[in-house]
Amino acid sequence: MSKLETVVNEIVAEMRDMPQRGEVASYIPELARVDPKAFGLVVIDAEGKVAAAGDADTPFSIQSISKVFTLTLALGKFGDRLWQRVGREPSGSRFNSIVQLEYEKGIPRNPFINAGAIAVTDAILGGHQPREALGEILRFMQYVAADDTIYIDDKVAASEQRTGFGNIALANYMKSFGVIEGPVDYTLGVYFHHCAIAMSCRQLAMAARYLAHFGNDPTTVLPVVTPERARRINALMLTCGHYDGSGEFAYRVGLPGKSGVGGGIMAIVPGKASIAVWSPGLDASGNSQLGQLALERLSKRMEWSIFGA
Ligand code: GLN
């Protein structure tokens, strides 16, 4: 067994009986049904070797992790013009906060808070039909993960559509500044559905490889994005990927990463590996409690922090 496999197995065993697991998200009713004891961890190294343990193949709701992929798509379409609609600064606020929009003319602080991701989704939609835009996002996920079985969990999307009044408010408020261009219900429909994409840790670690390998799919060596774009997306994940917990994540884990309220975290070790971890219980900032602890231990034992061992 390689060192990486040993470490991955050790960490999953350590997490099994951890008493402090955080709270499963319940504001999206469908997410509250998930087993709080579920735990999965998958790491894929530069040679494509997979170290997997726990619930590595159970699909879960990727939620905000999808924002990394919509950002990638939107940058592909608009390049740097995208930054006219959304900023690149950490918010220091909760993921669903509305306050900063008032002071910044409806321009969200970054593409990973809800307001920013809704603005990015609106850009991708760009006058097309929602089904078309959603199909494009799903196909991109399937392409980067090299897996056509990835799907949208319609129950989760419908559950959020029924209860997502905060996001509806954010979209309408941005619309009042002209930051959202299309019909608000189209944009939100696509947003709720891409958040409801279901993936396993194995599929997510596969999908993240282009960010770990300078924009290339390491198996086909086909470029997904330029090395510069991959580097910049990683920088945004490091500074904004965990909302008001981003500083803490950088301090403890030291890797670019993106969390979702489904309890998943995708993390990148530049040039070395892509990682996905899943534990549904969340901390006060909405980030997976044990997911962060597992990544802290993994990065320490493998000496992977980008800030040094
Ligand atoms: N769909 C969720 C929401 O909009 C995504 C939030 C998250 O994962 N942090 O509230």
Image (cartoon, rainbow, N blue to C red):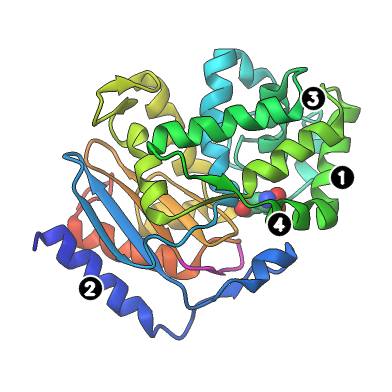
Task: Give the class, few, some or many, for how many residues have Cα within 10 Å of label 4's Cα (few <14, many ≥20).
Answer: some
Residue placed under numbered mark 1 in the picture: 169
Residue placed under numbered mark 4 in the picture: 155
Q: Is residue 111 left or right of residue 118?
A: left
**Which amino acid type is marked by label 3?**
Val
Q: Residue drawn 71% across and 30% down?
A: 131
Q: Is residue 4 above or below residue 82?
A: below
Residue placed under numbered mark 3 in the picture: 179
Tell me which numbered mark, 3 or 2, is placed earlier along the sequence. 2
**Mark pair 4, 1: CA separation:** 22 Å
Discs 3/4, front: 4
The secondary element bearing badge 4 is classed as helix
Ligand 1 is within 8 Å of the C-beta of the residue at disc 4: no
> Considering depth in this image, is 17 or 201 the residue closer to the camera?
201
Tell me which numbered mark, 1 or 3, is placed earlier along the sequence. 1
The secondary element bearing badge 2 is classed as helix
Task: Give the class, few, some or many, for how many residues have Cα within 10 Å of label 3's Cα (few <14, many ≥20).
Answer: many
Main SS category, magenta section: loop
Residue placed under numbered mark 2 in the picture: 10
Q: Is residue 204 left or right of residue 194?
A: left
Task: Give the class, few, some or many, for how many residues have Cα within 10 Å of label 2's Cα (few <14, many ≥20).
Answer: some
Q: Is residue 61 above or below residue 151?
A: below
- Residue 33's tag is none
Discs 2/4, front: 4
